Image: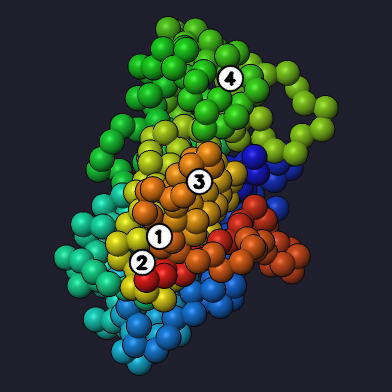
Amino acid sequence: MNFRDPLGSARDGESVDGSPEGGAEREVGHLPVMADEVLETLAPHPDSLQIDATLGGAGHAERILEACAPDGRLLGLDADGAAIARGRRRLARFGDRAVLRQTNFHELERVAPKAGFGAVDGLFMDLGLSSYQLGDVERGFGFRAGGRLDMRFDTGRGRPAADLLATMAAAELTALFRRYGEEPFAGRISRAIVETRRATPIETAEQLAALVVRSVPAPRARRIHPATRVFQALRIAVNDELGALEAGLAASLVLLRPGGRLVVLSYHSLEDRIVKRFIATEQRGCVCPPEVPVCVCGRLPRLRSLGKSRTPSEAEIQSNPRSRSARLRGAERVAA
Ligand SMILES: C[S@@+](CC[C@H](N)C(=O)[O-])C[C@H]1O[C@@H](n2cnc3c(N)ncnc32)[C@H](O)[C@@H]1O
């Protein structure tokens, strides 16, 4: 599994946000990853209708709106109200060509038609969290965040990570760290959590990161911070990220017009596997078992893959190290 720096996977000597000097990223905000490749794959034609399901810092959204001028429109979603507020400022010059909603893309199929985006030419998803979220020490995404260990994209819904750590049984925590983090020391870490919380609640990211470091053997060569997998697993669980991804992908089949394009940027193998399988299944159509000689399911292909996955150029990785685990996949809706 690849791990992305914005998860707080600071390596030794690096700041928590993955930038070598610390804080630099916060000043420039979130750099859109593989923006040229996204635009090339999405190919937004003038006057088209587009959805950016993960608005974040609105960097991709801005490029998409520029590309579909003069009359193309974009629906931008984000579960995080702060991202929507930032997006409103950044996209103000596009007037009513940009329609923004604070929504989890789990709800895409219901929300998009209501906003006038029931049949669209493009759907883009840039998964995970933004540099703004990572840089906000109150939200608990980074290892050294001093605020409550929250990790919710939408701070108005669901249970913060600190709640999960306070209430889940050791066996459940172990399963969670294994499933969403592929953490080899899941058992040890969970036992340490349960033991520690008897005396002191684990409420900050800093506390959790220190606990993980104490619980696992010191690595000989450290590629990522020892707490990276645990942080990732918690964040995925808190936001039901994989469930939302499945729902968002399924919505693309309903919302994309024939010829419309789905483009997804993922940052670790759990996400990418879901996207890859989804495209492969929908490209094949028929789901009959191989031993059935003639198709009886009658399912037709609904997507055409737009080729192999793509990764960022060396130059982009140099200038934006957070892009390094990105993988882009695209597919086109075909008429069923
Ligand atoms: C990597 S950032 C997007 C960055 C953006 N493309 C840009 O150019 O700045 C991912 C964003 O998606 C949001 N997000 C993640 N999962 C979501 C979901 N299921 N529903 C809605 N928003 C989600 C996060 O809150 C975050 O702001």
Which of discs 1 and 4 lies nearer the camera? The answer is 1
Q: Earlier in the sequence, mark 2 or mark 4?
A: 4
Which of discs 3 and 2 lies nearer the camera? The answer is 3
- Cα distance, mark 1 to mark 3? 16 Å
Question: In the current view of this chain or complex, which residue is farthest to the right?
Answer: 220
Task: Provide the residue designation for mark 4.
Answer: 186
- Using the image, determine if residue 190 lies above or below residue 242: above
Q: Amino acid at mark 4?
A: Ala
- Using the image, determine if residue 279 lies above or below residue 64: above
The quadrant holding residue 75 is bottom left
- Cα distance, mark 1 to mark 4? 42 Å
Callout 3: SS: loop
Q: Amino acid at mark 1?
A: Leu
Front in this rendered view, residue 93 or 282: 282
Q: Classify mark 4: residues with Cα within 10 Å, few (<14), some (14-19) or many (20+).
A: many
In this rendering, position of residue 129 left or right of residue 120: right
Q: Classify mark 1: residues with Cα within 10 Å, few (<14), some (14-19) or many (20+).
A: some
Q: Residue 204 — which label?
A: none
Q: Residue 170, percent across and down?
A: 47, 12
Question: Residue at 45% across / 38% down in the picture?
Answer: 236
Front in this rendered view, residue 298 or 256: 298
- Cα distance, mark 3 to mark 2? 22 Å
Task: Provide the residue designation for mark 3.
Answer: 293
In this rendering, position of residue 274 left or right of residue 90: right
The reply to whether dot 1 and dot 3 touch (C-beta < 8 Å) is no
Task: Provide the residue designation for mark 2.
Answer: 336
Q: Earlier in the sequence, mark 1 or mark 3?
A: 3
The reply to whether dot 1 and dot 2 touch (C-beta < 8 Å) is yes
